[in-house]
Image: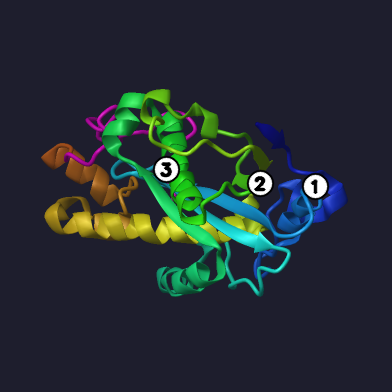
């Protein structure tokens, strides 16, 4: 597996890992720069991002969107999913699906987070999403742009990989890629919308936790409900849920 880090200042903000100013829409500059390293003709570039890392309940989810370059056509006006309203994210989904050559969201359930640990479960969700786009395309994308500081996909538990397609051969790791790369921003939107929908559906069966609003993150109403009612089958039992102010493993965040 080849891993290429984000480029330095030579590629300005989009490759230095800095967040772009508000109002600037991610583009395909980084994706196009990666195409030059591959064979002539169409190159399949995938963008991948995750949501749900810091939640107390529900899955961790990973989206992937594949674009065919150099002729992917105009991309939707995507951004990092966290800066978009819920209605805007939902409106973007059909545009993203029409634009991408393939797209998928993979999940790792709370029980898998408890069994394998958060990092490995995140990788498992990513490999499930990757398997789906490989199956739909009938081939492996040429390169993957992965949001973050390192390539966490190899951490997936081997016992759960038996029926999945091999992982990507070339991975370009980039901090804040969801703010600069259109394929990654699109993946973040798909993952956010699908996971939010799952949590809203679960809220009907478990209304005390307020998942229709907090989506499983550590909002006050959610923390208090855990104290009063105990955890549900969809909580991450390996986390400190019994505390009045439960906290996730080191490095996780409360943001929805």
- SS at circle 1: loop
Measured from the top left, where is residue 196 in percent x and y? 34, 58
Asked if the residues shown at circle 2 and circle 1 are in contact, with their CB atoms under 8 angstroms apart, the answer is yes
In the image, residue 112 lies at what x, y percent? 31, 32
The magenta stretch spans residue 243: yes
> How many numbered discs?
3
Q: What residue do we see at 51% from left, 68% from top?
A: 96
Task: Count residues near mark 3 (Cα–Cα under 10 Å), then give few for <14, some for 14-19, many for 20+.
Answer: many
Residue topped by disc 1 = 37
Dot 2 crowding, Cα within 10 Å, few <14, some 14–19, many 20+? many
Residue 248, position as x, y percentages in the image: 38, 33
* SS class, disc 2: strand
Question: Counting residues from the N terminus, which is met first, the one under dot 2 or under dot 1?
Answer: 1
Badges 1 and 3: C-beta atoms under 8 Å apart?
no
Q: Is residue 77 visible?
A: yes
Q: Which residue is mark 3?
A: 128
Q: Residue 2: give x, y in percent of width and height.
A: 69, 33
Residue nearest the viewer, comparing 186 with 218: 186
Question: Residue, x 38% and y 35% (percent of image)?
Answer: 163
N-terminal label among 1 and 3: 1
User: Which of the two residues, 27 or 25, is positioned nearer the viewer here?
Assistant: 27
Which is nearer the eye, 71 or 172?
71
Q: In the shown orientation, is residue 53 left or right of residue 187?
A: left
* Residue at which label 2 appears: 143
Q: Which residues are magenta?
A: 232-256
Labelled disc at residue 85: none
């Amino acid at each position: 597996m080849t891993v290429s880090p984000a480029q330095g200042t030579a590629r300005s903000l989009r490759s230095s890992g800095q967040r772009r100013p508000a109002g600037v829409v991610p583009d395909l500059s980084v994706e196009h720069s990666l195409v030059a390293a591959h064979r002539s003709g169409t190159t399949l570039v995938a963008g991948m991002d995750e949501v749900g890392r810091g939640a107390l309940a529900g899955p961790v989810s990973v989206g992937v969107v594949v674009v065919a370059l150099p002729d992917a056509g105009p991309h939707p006006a995507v951004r990092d999913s966290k800066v978009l309203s819920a209605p805007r994210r939902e409106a973007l989904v059909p545009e993203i699906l029409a634009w991408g050559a393939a797209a998928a969201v993979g999940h790792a359930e709370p029980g898998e987070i408890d069994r394998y640990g958060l990092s490995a479960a995140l990788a498992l969700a990513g490999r499930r999403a990757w398997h789906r786009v490989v199956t739909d395309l009938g081939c492996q994308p040429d390169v993957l742009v992965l949001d973050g500081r390192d390539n966490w996909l190899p951490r997936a538990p081997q016992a759960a990989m038996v029926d999945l397609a091999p992982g990507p051969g070339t991975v370009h790791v980039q901090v804040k890629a969801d703010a600069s790369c259109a394929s990654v921003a699109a993946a973040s939107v798909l993952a956010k919308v699908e996971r939010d929908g799952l949590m809203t559906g679960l809220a009907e069966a478990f209304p005390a936790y307020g998942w229709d609003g907090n989506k499983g993150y550590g909002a006050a109403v959610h923390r208090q409900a855990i104290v009063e009612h105990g955890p549900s089958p969809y909580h991450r039992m390996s986390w400190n849920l019994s505390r009045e102010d439960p906290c996730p493993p080191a490095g996780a965040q409360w943001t929805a």
